[in-house]
């Protein structure tokens, strides 16, 4: 019986992780509202996808800097419907 419960929990975790991965696949098209509400991992994935789509470096330093820029934009000038790629003007 314990193995059935574990299998069910693992299956549920896979579904949740799959759904969160789908939401981050929007990259730069992610809105500020989505970005702010997302988990840290989903925010990072959105920034990585945005950088990849732009042909830019996805090094830890670049992702960290761009993540901070996106968060600052979304918390100050950006509206909840603005996309995170708008940090580039």
Image: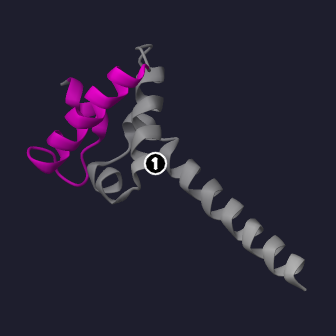
Picture residue at 29% right of the left edge, 35% below the top: 67
Circle 1 sits on which residue? 42
Q: Is residue 41 above or below residue 55?
A: below
The C terminus, quarter of image: top left
Of residue 86 and residue 11, the one placed in the foreground of this image is 11
How many numbered marks are there? 1
**Secondary structure of residue under mark 1:** helix
**Disc 1 crowd, CA 10 A, few/some/many (<14, 14-19, 20+):** many
Horizontal side, residue 13 vs residue 86: left or right: right
Q: Residue at x 83, y 71 (%)?
A: 7
Q: Is residue 73 magenta?
A: yes
Residue for point 41% across, 18% down: 54
Which residue does the image show at 49% across and 45% down from the upper left?
A: 24
Could you tell me residue 3's position as x and y percent? 88, 76
Residue 66: horizontal and vertical position, in percent?
Answer: 28, 29
Near-viewer residue (63 or 5): 5
Residue 2 to residue 61: above or below: below
Q: Give left or right: position of 88 versus 24.
A: left
Q: Which residues are magenta?
A: 59-88
Q: Quadrant of the N terminus?
A: bottom right
- Most common SS among magenta residues: helix
Indicate the position of residue 61 as horizontal and vertical percent values.
Answer: 33, 22
Q: Quadrant of residue 88?
A: top left
Residue 10 at x, y percent in the picture: 75, 66
In the visual, does 36 lie left or right of 18? left
Residue 75 lies in the magenta-colored region: yes
- Work out whether 3 lies above or below 78: below
Residue 43 falls left or right of residue 25: left
In depth, the one of 40 and 70 nearer the eye is 40
Q: Considering only vertical position in the picture, is 16 above or below 27?
A: below
Residue, far bottom = 1
Q: Which residue is situated farthest in the front direction here?
A: 2
């Amino acid at each position: 019986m314990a193995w059935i419960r574990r299998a069910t929990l693992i299956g549920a975790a896979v579904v949740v992780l799959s759904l969160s991965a789908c939401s981050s696949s929007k990259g730069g098209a992610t809105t500020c509202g989505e970005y702010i509400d997302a988990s840290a991992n989903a925010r990072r994935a959105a920034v990585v996808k945005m950088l990849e789509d732009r042909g830019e470096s996805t090094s830890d330093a670049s992702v960290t800097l761009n993540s901070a820029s996106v968060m600052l934009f979304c918390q100050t000038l950006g509206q909840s419907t603005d996309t995170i790629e708008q940090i580039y003007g």
